Image (cartoon, coloured by chain):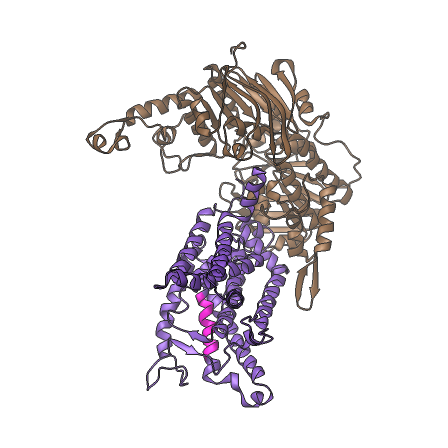
């Protein structure tokens, strides 16, 4: 029995067990404090959908061999630009389409934003991949710094880019883009609200459209990972020499993986923004990489191997934890932002744990 | 050697890993000053037994073991590697554990430095004491002299030949005071023949100082040459204890595999017609920049349908030949495969021209250790020949059904011992891993197959199977096979002709039945040692 328990613990992983236990105990605490559990559950689902694709961006990165991609901010920037262009030109409210259906117009808007984001992220990701091919062995450090650097660089760019729309730039003849841009008149909640299940008088709100969208993107990535190129990419990540002996260009596979990761980040940030209702610029997305890395690690990924199931489980646990922790903490300790502190502890703690567990890619033990 | 006392007695040792009985009542007895060979095929349980002897955590984290261990007649519990060290048990590792930037002396004395107190150490404790380099050098010298290694004690380990590193490892072990039992785990696997001979000599010297040796090896000739007695294991069971003077290599081999081994390969019908003008692989002015195995302007013609051997001492460049053709290392020159000239700078060029390769570095190049057997078998053929794929519009997806079926067929055909095709390749024994590598190469349906060190580190049973398979492929499918190996016996038992490579060039091409003297001469680099076959 003890033996069996041990092997189960080893299989599921100690941090996951602790986090699941903590997660469940928070639910009980929430119930005890008389919080609206249905509301909390709805929030969990919403956050899960909002972060799903961003976290999914870790899968191709890890599988192609660059490891945990702290630099998804590279792709996020592409996605944000796409989102801004749509707001600038009011592409989510094209009159002839609004006349047919306002929801359809919003969908057109966000799909244009995604398309622009994908194009930009492909270019950025390719260059980013070229960089990572030159720093083999220390990708994790480099991605972290590149992720921060692009934020600093864009902090300059956001103030000088020639956007004109009053919604975007600071009011009263100010210069530069605003810190937080409301999407209320654009595509706020378009994916989340599509097909949403929101019974009258109940606090239940299931963002069906968002969940379906995330699962659809997961399906695409899953198909890619089973394709000839996807399998070659995974092999190049697992054992570059092996891949080379089978005639595979390892650097090319890393470029593909990095680009795909960056593109997913661009799509992911737009899903996030529409769910949130705002685009956050400047330092807003700075820690996105860390949250996504932490989520996929909680789900069971390692710096060497990540699956889509890790993404789905990890995102739900990590985001769910934050959703319930905030109201529970506020009830217990009314002052301070304990939830933010907890997010930092969990995110950084799980990253540290995963890095400690990493045995340098050898499973001989 | 004192045959009334036992330095080590392990009695009725049993061990199971999650319900799988891997040791079934093993006895092992070693006298002081004896060289005792522990023999068995891969997977026979040698490593597990040694892990028990050293109190490795892998044993104790999986429920411990059954049976008793006695050291010098005292029953002991060895539950940590430190305990084993305290009891005077040492291990010479197969992979070297030396610090390249340190000198020979520093490596030997690492962790057991001799030091004097000084002012600083009186305040900050023992770790600040001054090193007594003179005394340390003396000790190191003594240990080196014992095993007869003529290396200066002040040179750095980095850059020394592999053989020397092995000796420094041994020197470090025998320098430990109170050492009474040394385990050599396949120490000659990485050595050249002359180095191996020196090592065996050193083992005799160590044994003469009343230190017992447990010698784990696959090489029967070494056992016959140096050991006093042997214990043979098979499938986790104790098979036999023999004094070497009462037995023969043939008997030990038989005990190990449980069936008679007469020749490495049985004769089979030969309907081949080899013609000197029908060349499968033509190599001209060929160089390969493979570190440690440089090829320097080599010419070679390999006839279609023959089994061609490439031999030679380690470091002379024989391994560079296939690695260059497969594009793993920078290569120049003209290589023509079945009339098609290869562009050596294009990755995968050889694979696309019906050439397959089984690498000598199984774990590093040959396998995806964490992936399934199935994935390992189908991978190259999928990537190179687009097999096992189904096309949906513009995307080509893995055809699982076809892949499963093929992997199962290969597992059955090559008798790969596994729990199923989804078992990770890294969990298999060496011989079975080699079969997976071969299965992958065969899945490519090659016309020309390069096999590099096909039997390195695998047991006799698997060795025979692998060589038989090569011979069968050659005779039945007309596959041209090039075997690169450091074991001459193996080359001479399967090949039609054998090229001996010295200093990056072919020194001569011999027939398998040419005399030992001819081979010796060719290996030593003298031209004209034999006639063309």
Q: Colour of chain A?
A: purple
Classified by dominant secondary structure, the portion drawn in magenta counts as: helix
Residue B91 place in picture, x, y as percent: 48, 27
Residue A75 on the magenta segment: yes
Asked whether residue B501 appears in the rendered view, the answer is yes
Drawn side of residue B453 relative to residue A178, left or right: right
Residue A136 against residue B455 in the figure, above or below: below
Task: Give whichever of B367, A178 is nearer the camera.
Answer: A178
Task: Give whichever of B501, A152 is nearer the camera.
Answer: A152
Residue at 43%, 64% (x, y): give it: A327
Quarter occupied by residue B486? top right
* Magenta-drawn segment: A73-84
Q: Where the C terminus of chain B falls, by quadrant?
A: top right
Residue A54 against residue B117 in the figure, above or below: below
Residue A345 against residue B415 in the figure, above or below: below
Task: Give whichever of B421, B105 is nearer the camera.
Answer: B421
Residue A62 place in picture, x, y as percent: 51, 56
Asked whether residue A255 appears in the rendered view, the answer is no
Instruction: Find the residue positioned furthest to the left.
Output: B119
Residue at 55%, 50% (x, y): give it: A239
- Colour brown belongs to chain: B
Residue B370 on the magenta segment: no
Q: Count the labels in the image.
A: 0
């Amino acid at each position: 029995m003890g033996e069996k328990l041990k092997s189960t613990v080893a299989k599921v992983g100690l941090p996951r067990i602790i986090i699941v236990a903590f997660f469940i105990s928070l639910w009980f605490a929430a119930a005890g404090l008389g919080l609206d559990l249905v509301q909390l559950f709805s929030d969990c689902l919403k956050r899960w959908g909002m972060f799903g694709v961003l976290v999914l961006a870790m899968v191709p990165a890890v599988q192609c061999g660059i490891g945990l991609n702290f630099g998804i901010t590279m792709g996020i920037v592409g996605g944000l630009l796409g989102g801004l262009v749509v707001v600038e030109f009011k592409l989510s409210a094209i009159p002839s389409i609004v006349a047919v259906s306002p929801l359809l117009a919003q969908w057109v808007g966000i799909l244009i934003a995604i398309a622009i984001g994908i194009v930009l992220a492909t270019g950025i990701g390719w260059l980013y991949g070229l960089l990572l091919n030159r720093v083999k062995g220390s990708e994790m450090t480099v991605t972290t710094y590149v992720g921060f650097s692009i934020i600093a660089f864009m902090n300059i760019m956001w103030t000088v880019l020639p956007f004109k729309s009053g919604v975007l730039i600071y009011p009263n003849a100010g210069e530069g883009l605003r810190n937080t841009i409301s999407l209320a008149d654009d595509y706020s909640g378009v994916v989340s609200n599509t097909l949403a299940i929101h019974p009258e008088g109940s606090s239940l709100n299931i963002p069906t459209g968002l969940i379906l969208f995330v699962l659809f993107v997961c399906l695409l990535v899953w198909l890619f990972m089973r394709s000839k190129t996807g399998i070659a990419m995974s092999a190049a990540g697992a054992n570059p020499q092996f891949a080379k002996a089978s005639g595979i260009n390892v650097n090319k596979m890393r470029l593909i993986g990095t680009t795909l990761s960056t593109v997913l980040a661009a799509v992911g940030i737009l899903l996030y923004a529409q769910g949130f209702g705002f685009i956050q610029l400047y330092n807003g997305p700075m820690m996105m990489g860390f949250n996504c890395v932490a989520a996929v690690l909680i789900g069971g990924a390692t710096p060497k191997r990540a699956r889509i199931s890790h993404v789905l489980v990890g995102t739900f646990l990590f985001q769910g934890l934050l959703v319930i922790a905030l109201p529970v903490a506020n009830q217990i300790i009314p002052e301070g932002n304990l939830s933010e502190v907890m997010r930092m502890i969990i995110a950084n703690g799980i990253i540290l744990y995963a890095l400690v567990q990493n045995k340098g890619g050898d499973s001989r033990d | 050697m004192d045959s009334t006392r036992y330095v080590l007695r392990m009695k009725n040792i049993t061990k199971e890993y999650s319900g799988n009985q891997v040791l079934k009542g093993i006895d092992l007895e070693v006298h002081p000053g004896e060289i005792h060979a522990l023999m068995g095929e891969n997977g026979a349980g040698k490593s597990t037994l040694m892990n028990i002897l050293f109190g490795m955590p892998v044993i104790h984290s999986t429920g411990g073991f059954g049976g008793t261990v006695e050291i010098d007649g005292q029953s002991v519990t060895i539950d940590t590697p430190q305990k084993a060290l305290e009891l005077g048990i040492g291990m010479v590792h197969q992979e070297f554990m030396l610090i390249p930037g340190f000198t020979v002396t520093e490596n030997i004395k690492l962790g057991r430095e001799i030091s004097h107190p000084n002012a600083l150490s009186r305040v900050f404790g023992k770790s600040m004491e001054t090193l007594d380099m003179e005394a340390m050098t003396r000790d190191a010298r003594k240990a080196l002299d014992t095993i007869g290694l003529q290396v200066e004690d002040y040179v750095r380990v980095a850059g020394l030949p592999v053989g020397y590193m092995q000796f420094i490892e041994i020197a470090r072990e025998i320098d430990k005071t109170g050492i009474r039992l040394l385990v050599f785990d396949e120490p000659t696997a990485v050595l050249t023949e002359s180095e191996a001979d020196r090592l065996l000599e050193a083992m005799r010297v160590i044994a003469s100082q009343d230190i017992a040796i447990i010698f784990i090896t696959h090489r029967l000739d070494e056992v016959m040459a140096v050991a006093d007695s042997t214990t043979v294991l098979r499938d986790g069971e104790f098979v036999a204890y023999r004094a070497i003077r009462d037995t023969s290599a043939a008997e030990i081999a038989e005990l190990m595999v449980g069936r008679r081994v007469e020749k490495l390969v049985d004769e089979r019908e030969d309907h081949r017609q080899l013609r000197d003008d029908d060349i499968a692989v033509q190599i001209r002015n060929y160089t390969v920049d493979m570190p440690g195995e440089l090829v320097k302007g080599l010419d070679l013609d390999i006839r279609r349908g023959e089994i061609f051997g490439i031999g030679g001492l380690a470091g002379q460049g024989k391994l560079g030949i296939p690695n260059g053709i497969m594009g793993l290392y920078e290569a120049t020159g003209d290589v023509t495969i079945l009339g098609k000239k290869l562009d050596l700078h294009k990755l995968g060029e050889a694979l696309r021209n019906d050439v397959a390769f089984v690498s000598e570095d199984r774990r590093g190049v040959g396998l995806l250790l964490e992936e399934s057997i199935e994935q390992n078998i189908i991978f190259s053929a999928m990537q190179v020949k687009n097999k096992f794929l189904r096309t949906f519009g513009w995307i080509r997806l893995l055809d699982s059904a076809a892949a499963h079926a093929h992997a199962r067929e290969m597992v059955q055909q090559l008798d790969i011992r596994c729990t199923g095709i989804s078992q990770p390749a890294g969990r298999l024994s060496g011989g079975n891993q080699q079969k997976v590598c071969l299965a992958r190469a065969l899945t490519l349906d090659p016309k020309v197959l390069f096999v590099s060190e096909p039997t390195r580190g695998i047991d006799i049973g698997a060795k025979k199977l692998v060589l038989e398979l090569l011979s069968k492929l050659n005779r039945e499918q007309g596959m041209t096979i090039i075997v690169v190996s450091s074991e001459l016996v193996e080359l001479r038992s399967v090949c039609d002709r054998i090229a001996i490579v010295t200093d990056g060039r072919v020194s001569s091409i011999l027939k398998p039945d040419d005399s030992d003297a001819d081979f010796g001469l060719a290996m030593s680099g003298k031209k004209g040692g034999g006639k063309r076959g």
